[in-house]
Amino acid sequence: PNPQRDDNDGRPRRRMTRNRALFAALLLRRAPSPSSAFLVPAVGRLRPSPSYFTTRPPPSARNHRSIGMTAAATSSAAPVAAGPPAFFPTRDEAHAAAAEMALEASSSQKTLARCGDLACQHDSFLRSLEGSSVLGWALYEDKPSGGKGKKKKKGGGKQKKDQAHKAGGGDAASPLRCALVLSDSVFFPEGGGQPADRGRIVLHLEGDGEKSDGIVELDVLDGINLDGTCILTCRPEGSVKDAARDDLANQLGRSVVSVKQEIDWSLRFDHMTQHSAQHLLSAIAASDEFGNLYTSSFSLGRGEAVTSYIDFVVGDELYAKDIEESRSLLRRVEERANECIRRNLPMTPRYIDPESEEFAEKVRSRVLPEGLTGPLRLVEIGDGIDLNTCCGTHVPSLAHLQSIQLFRMEKVKGGVVRAHFAAAERLRRISAAMYDRQAKFTAMLCSVEEDHVERVAKMLDDKIQKEKEMKGVVEKLCALQAGDVARECRESGGVAAVDLGVGVDMGYMMQLSSAVKEIIESEQEGDSDAPLLLFMSSTDGGDSKGEEGAFLLTGDAGVVDRLGKNVAEALGGRGGGKNGRFQGKGTQIKSGLKESRRLLRD
């Protein structure tokens, strides 16, 4: 299903075969099974696919229900050919192609586990999975997005490369990506507010004889739910150049003997503990005891030491009061949440019919997609604390959360207060980082922790006072210096070029220019030409010997416009401006002073 590819885009089309047409008709009529109904519309979509979507029948064996560190199929999977090479210009087209290939490959034996029925959603502590098969794949290149007409920021390309390198985990991040669909997944695709899992997939390829002669290793970078199909975004492990693209396609096009999936467990555990903590806080805040505080949105944060947050709708009355009133109420929510953690309440997924009476009475969130049919996946917290629709992975017991801590609380918009929080290992890392910073402040301020706030407040007050005093000194210095520059103007026919020394900022240059102009205007009667002033200052430090710095040219608008670029060239730099002001930077501030003064006098 891809609306971007129509019959007018110049791509070759093939008429639907009889079998494909029958499958499409069956798909449109078939009601979804209970296991595949979670957030998947009852009516499917299928468009005629290009000829390179041909695959051999997938294996029928699928067994992921063994609980523990690893799940493996009890029967050997038949080899599956993933099809000839398929390259696409965009990620969306590749995702759509891989999804359609998987749907066609699994149509006869229904081996594709749909989102809501994935291995990771039945056992959130499952760290690896063996025995699945490749049902669909497509290749594309991950190209950095950039709008037309936008200036390229200095170092921007390197920053994007560094981000890609960090995300991929390789020595040199490859732009080549593979959209992969497996018969079942231990990787959770992003959804329900929870980020996608990352990890690694190893494909063993069919070879001559009994031994496999090839291995494809893929880094899993992301995962999405496309109309109920879990699509994993993978990158070939290590560095892959453009010349190797066809080699990867040829490898994926061969029969896959076995598939091994391994998730980044620390990332998964972090995601599901923060998500479970959000469920608990939102459920308690929504109770009658705490005024039915509705959760309008939340974010789980991305990073080991980044807080998550929940936006609570506190109402206009509470919002109008001081933020301390909201803080006090949410602190009580935090205390109640930690009580539930100490009670070791269970947290379990279950399925329920949205048409049932229990759904209408007990489920906290009842907003459903249009066209949804069949049972829904929910997550339940014991003792009647919560029952809420959710597709994410969660801890089986609240004890895994260890503790929940609310941090900053702030008003963000009408009636909404944002509360930042952390739980489990992330809370421990944030607390450790906070303690390390506090220890550094203790050494810097030479005071105990209890006096930090008072000591810093005093330092800020002293800084404000010193700035006021410095402002008065600068004004007096500017008045004295303006008199000297005005005298040079009178002696040089209304022109002055002054080297102000090292470290003078542009603000002082402008202030000095205005002061000189006021003095000259007060001494002259009637209309007169504005003085032509050039100020410059060297940058402090470096190996430039005082040559690098900034300059400011002011005067009559026509004269400044005509001379600005010439002066900048004499100073070894460039600049710009308008309305009688031209400023810039140069690399010959001292050596170019003589030539600049000549330009002004001429």
Image (cartoon, rainbow, N blue to C red):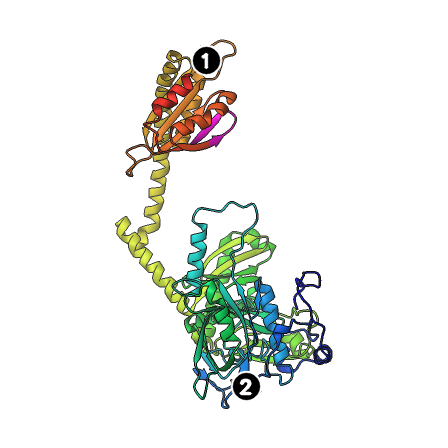
Residue under the point 62% across and 85% down: 109
Residue bearing the label numbered 2: 62
Q: Main secondary structure of the magenta part?
A: strand
Disc assigned to residue 290: none
The amino acid on which the numbered mark 1 sits, given as a three-letter code, is: Ser
Residue 399 pos. (x, y %)? 43, 76
Q: Is residue 518 left or right of residue 372?
A: left
Specify the farthest residue to the bottom: 75
Q: Does residue 70 appear in the picture of this structure?
A: yes
Foreground pick, 135 / 535? 135
Magenta stretch: includes residue 581? yes
In the rendered image, residue 175, in percent from the top left (x then y), is placed at 48, 62
First along the sequence among labels 1 and 2? 2
Query: Residue 522 — which label?
Result: 1
Amino acid identity at mark 2: Arg
Q: Residue at x 66, y 64 (%)?
A: 11
587 with respect to 254 (left or right): left
* Image: magenta residue range: 576-584
Q: Is residue 294 visible?
A: no
Q: How many marks?
A: 2
